[in-house]
């Protein structure tokens, strides 16, 4: 049972699933955050380009329709598509209007090996 000691806590780092690529996961997390490069209520494309360049990527294209935003970035031969999530009150209301599908949740739990709480 592996783990690391921190001041007074011990935590176990689980093994990553086969095929999991930490560098891609990290890149995707960064790209998600970069989607919030804003100047007021508008996307700041210059800031987005600068943030991408800072991690060795380039902006290929950006799509902005009303309050929705997505962009395509490239790093060498790798191409990424990132979407901005909830960024305003209307988005939050859409997020709150969510109805879980029991069959989908059960399938996810079975495939991921995670135990999900009831309800």
Image (cartoon, grey):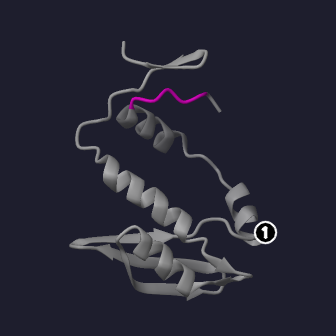
Q: Label 1: how many residues lie within 10 Å, few (<14), some (14-19) or many (20+)?
A: few
- Under tag 1, what secondary structure? helix
Q: Considering depth in this image, is 26 or 104 the residue closer to the camera?
A: 26
Q: Position of residue 76 (x, y in %)?
A: 23, 73
Residue at the disc numbered 1: 89
Front residue of 90/3: it is 3
116 within the magenta span? yes
Q: Is residue 114 above or below residue 7?
A: below
Please, what is the dominant secondary structure of the magenta stretch? Answer: loop
Residue found at x 75% / y 71%: 90
Percent coordinates x, y for residue 59 in the rendering: 40, 82
Does the image show residue 97?
Answer: no
Q: Is residue 19 left or right of residue 89?
A: left
Using the image, determine if residue 100 lies above or below residue 64: above
Hey, which quadrant is residue 38 in on the image?
Answer: bottom right
- Residue drawn at x 39%, y 59% is 27
| Quarter of the figure with the N terminus | top left
Q: Nearer the viewer, residue 40 or 103?
A: 40
Q: Residue at 29% x, 44% y: name it.
A: 20
Residue drawn at 60 percent across, 79 percent down? 68
| Residue 57, horizontal then vertical, whole percent | 36, 74
Report x, y in % for residue 60: 37, 85
Q: Give the magenta range.
A: 113-117
Asked if the stretch drawn in magenta spans residue 108, the answer is no
In the displayed orientation, state which residue is furthest to the front: 7
């Amino acid at each position: 049972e592996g783990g690391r000691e921190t001041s007074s806590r011990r935590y176990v780092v689980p093994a990553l699933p086969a095929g999991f690529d930490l560098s891609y996961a990290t890149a995707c997390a960064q790209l998600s955050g970069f989607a919030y490069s804003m100047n007021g209520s508008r996307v700041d494309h210059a800031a987005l380009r600068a943030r991408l360049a800072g991690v060795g990527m380039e902006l290929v294209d950006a799509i902005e329709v009303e309050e929705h935003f997505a962009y395509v970035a490239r790093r060498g031969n790798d191409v990424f598509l990132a979407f901005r999530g909830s960024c305003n009150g209307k988005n939050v209301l859409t997020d709150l209007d969510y109805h879980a599908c029991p069959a989908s949740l059960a399938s996810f739990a079975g495939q991921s090996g995670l135990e999900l709480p009831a309800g």
